Image (cartoon, rainbow, N blue to C red):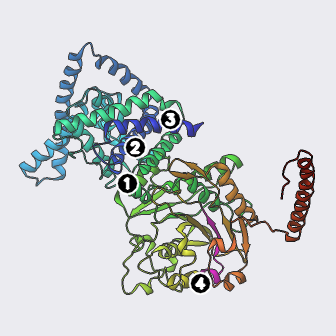
Amino acid sequence: MMENKAKQLGDLLWKVACKQLRGKMGANSFQDYMLSFLFLYYISNNYLKYIKKELANDYIKCEEECRRLNDKNNPKLLSQTKKEYEEKIKEFVEKDLKEYTKKNPYITVKALDDERNKRIKTLEELINGSIITPLTLWYLKNLEDVAYFEEIVRKKIHYIIKPQYLWDNIYEMAKDENEHMLEILQNGFTFIENKSFNITFKGLFSEVNLSSEKLGKDNPQRNLRVCNIIKEIGDGLLQFNVESIKENDILGDAYEYLISQFASNSGAKAGEFYTPQEVSTILSEIVTLDSQNPKIQKQTDINGMLDFACGSGSLLINVKKHVDKINEENKSHIKITRIYGQENNVTTYNLARMNMILHGIKDNEFEIFHGDTLANEWGIFSEKNPSKKIECDIVVANPPFSLNWDYPSNIKDDFRFAGYGVAPRSTADFAFLLHGFHFLKNSGTMAIILPHGVLFRGGEEGNIRQKLIDDGNIDAIIGLPSNLFFSTGIPVCIIVLKKCRKEDDILFINADKYFRKDKNRNKLDEAHIKKIVDTYRERKEESNYSKRVSKKMIVDNEYNLNISRYVSTAVEDKIVNLDKVKEDLDKIESAIIETKVKVNSFLKELDLPELK
């Protein structure tokens, strides 16, 4: 039910995107606008829900007064009220500057004038909107208490947003095609990036270019275009009545659905930020099983979860949602103590941070880093002191396939690759794998998506593969159907790794024939996913589908892990019994001779030529 609601909302928002932006820019560009506006809607609504409870009767009184002030039949009242508050703002700023000059006695006249103008301009944003919202009115009535109030709110819900930057004000400005829209929106984005959260979300909207000529040739055209986009999004959300359902789930899932739509329209670039939902589900269900007894779910808190090539964060979120589902079904209280994600592409890095918040994950529960994983640029993961090493119970990843990488001359000293060797410059697949594996706990589980080449290529990759096999670290290899991903049509595999495990064999699952054709892509249905996960959980063997292969057999096959070598999906030819075939042919020949004799007797009676 919830999935259908999310898809319906996603479809509605997708139509808005196509109508307003498609044709003017590529899918990978207009996603930045759509997803940013949806993010603003979400954090605004969550913020207002709390504010209404915190201000209680004061908010209700402001609501009632705003209905009178915003009466379209009496526009003069709103205009007059704004002028009154404009004077109050100036009085408040002058009073506040007296305290400021006491702390800064040597400030110059020019610097003081600049500070005055800056403060007045910021506060006047409160009255630049098309209406006065209840929270705006409360701020105007209580200018001296605002700083203290915001401090309390930040402690409770971890972030604040000024009234003029909230969605309800932005939406009303859009409906009136307010000339200040671009200015207010840009200032709002800057505020959210730098001041809203306890943790700075610097550059969160860096890809949203409100000055782009793709939005219009000049500022008035761009302002109108943005107003139209926001108005249609707002109308759609009202039509859908989002607030009547479980908002965290529906908006987060709609955001994920939109990302998948943008991915399918972005072609090869989509692989940089999106893992198909059904593939994410397989990984999520596997890594949340008990490491030593996969027949049961994890029973303890998950101390750290890492995706070092997290894209839009869909894999991390999928695991989190699956843990929540386990808790709901089992009435358990398993927590993920910390979520770590790393992404090298700035656009998808921003998508990931928004995605976390949209799915109800608080800013102090996750950390997404923008930087190169292969260069190990993230300081907390490049710590050489073993006592400070971060280790995670869960590591998941869908890194770029067969990426060229340029490593330094001293790469062999890198602690991530020590004892294994270095992946070749032409294919970084094993470099990614070893990076994640290094930060896996002894009791943890890692699942990574890679191309099949890692299973059989020789050279340095063969040496790394041999070391992992000899140490018993490869738990399972799952072959998936081709054409599941937006970025490539090649078949891929999931490699499951553990540092400590009971089994001495490797489970091979060949699921490449189990899929449903869906237009130009293949998809996995719930039954296909269940079959894979159940087979892994029980380590079941099934003809033409799965097999447990001993280490000895793999060594005998020169450490080649090509799935079809151990589990072939080819249908065996039926064994033909030649003696039986000869017997049948003899009977047929005898029957022909007997029939011929009869027919010739009839022909003779009719005085017709006989058969030869």
Q: Residues within 10 Å of mark 2 (few under 14, many from 20)?
A: many
Please report whichever mark, 4 or 3, sits nearer to the chain's N-terminal start: 3
Please report whichever mark, 2 or 1, sits nearer to the chain's N-terminal start: 2
Which stretch is magenta? 466-480
Labels 1, 4: front one: 4
CA gap between label 4 and label 3 equals 49 Å
Residue beneath label 2, please? 39
Closest to the observer: 362 or 508?
A: 508
Residue 474 lies in the magenta-colored region:
yes
CA gap between label 2 and label 4 equals 45 Å
- Using residue 16 as the reference point, say whether residue 547 is left or right of it: right
CA gap between label 3 and label 1 equals 25 Å
Q: For the residue marked with disc 4, what is the amino acid? A: Lys
- The quadrant the N terminus occupies is top right
Check residue 350 in the rendering and tell me which mark sits there, or answer none. Answer: 1
Above or below for 429 versus 313: below
Residue beneath label 3, please? 8
Residue beneath label 4, please? 467
Question: Is the C-beta separation of discs 3 and 1 under 8 Å?
Answer: no
Question: Is the C-beta separation of discs 4 and 3 under 8 Å?
Answer: no
Q: Residues within 10 Å of mark 1 (few under 14, many from 20)?
A: many
Q: Position of residue 402 (x, y in %)?
A: 45, 71
Q: Quadrant of residue 579?
A: bottom right
Identified at 89% across, 50% down, the residue is 599
Q: For the residue marked with disc 3, what is the amino acid? A: Gln
Identified at 59% across, 84% down, the residue is 467
Question: Is the C-beta separation of discs 3 and 2 under 8 Å?
Answer: no
Q: Tell me, yes or no, if residue 258 can be seen here.
A: yes
Labels 3, 2: front one: 3
Please report whichever mark, 3 or 2, sits nearer to the chain's N-terminal start: 3
